[in-house]
Amino acid sequence: MGKLINKLFFNKNKIQTFYISRLHANEVAEKVYLKNGAHRADITSTNSMICLDPFCMAAWLPAEQAALTGNQEAEIHFVKGSQLNAVINVSLIEKIPTPKGILFLYKVKKVKNHQLSALHRLVLFAYFLRSKANTYHSRKVISAMYSYPRSIIIVSYKDADYCNIFPMDIHGYIQEEEMYLLGLRTTNVTLDKILAAKKVVVCDTNDVDINTVYDLGKHSSKSPAAPDHLPFKTTESELFRFPVPDFIGSYKEIEIITNKKMGYHMLMIGKVLNKKQVKDDPSSLYHIGFLQFQKGNYKSIDGLF
């Protein structure tokens, strides 16, 4: 059945939630905008997913733009060139003042995808609904959220008795504030340890192969593999002395300043205390939604995600 759908609707492309590409930041062609009433603001570099159950997003705006965004309801537009690819209707959960602006936390209400035809989208979402873990709404939201490529990072934490190095893509970096957002599953054992220590290191995925990333994601957070049992070497970060994989191009050492339970994920908001550039112009692995990937020129890395 899957092969027939591939042939008829998707030019024999394998149907999967994400495609994975390796990109430099300047190679990401999509833009993201926050539309609130008559006001539209570019949040391409400051939007992030923060929870997947319920679906929630964050967006940061500088003070002068945030003052124009007063409505409880808003829309998040995903655009490439002149093409509108998806719209997510959101409602405000909370505004968090920051030194230079406002961090908006939103809950997803409604979604509209525009890639390909309505029939293509219906067939794709029906295909995914073969799994009872999926709902029509969840597939639409995931497709819309990943209409903007989401970078995969490596997270590192260590204390005297425990160490975990794992991947995630629910995160965001707000350069203007040197602020970092991380949405970590509440079931992850590492979460309580990070919150207690208020320290974490995040790294890019510059030189790592996707299977290594996948294997890191399979490790149980209760008993993760020790650094000397991993298939790569590590060094220590400058401030926290946490393990940093040798395949990275840069890392950030982050102090967690506050946290908020959003649902299945805990939102952690941190301050970047130290940035280390190991290689010039590093790349990262990115998740790109199936529909969006069909419309772009990104190259796929055949992996297991």
Image: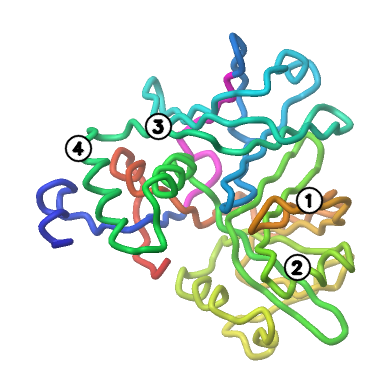
**For the residues carrying marks 1 and 2, which lies nearer the camera in this image?**
1
CB contact under 8 Å: marks 3 and 2 = no
Taking the view exactly as shown, the residue that stands out farthest to the bottom is: 229
Q: Earlier in the sequence, mark 1 or mark 4?
A: 4
Instruction: Magenta stretch: give its range.
Output: 23-35
Marks 1 and 2 sit apart, C-alpha to C-alpha, by: 12 Å
Residue nearest the viewer, comparing 210 with 160? 160
CB contact under 8 Å: marks 1 and 4 = no
Q: Tag 1's secondary structure?
A: strand
Of the 4 image quadrants, the one containing the C terminus is bottom left
Q: Earlier in the sequence, mark 1 or mark 2?
A: 2
Tag of residue 10: none
The residue tagged 4 is 119
Q: Tag 4's secondary structure?
A: helix
Q: Residue at x 65, y 63 (%)?
A: 185
Residue 192: image location, x then y, percent = 80, 69
The residue tagged 3 is 112
The residue tagged 2 is 191
Q: Earlier in the sequence, mark 4 or mark 2?
A: 4
Looking at the image, residue 16 lies above or below residue 109? below
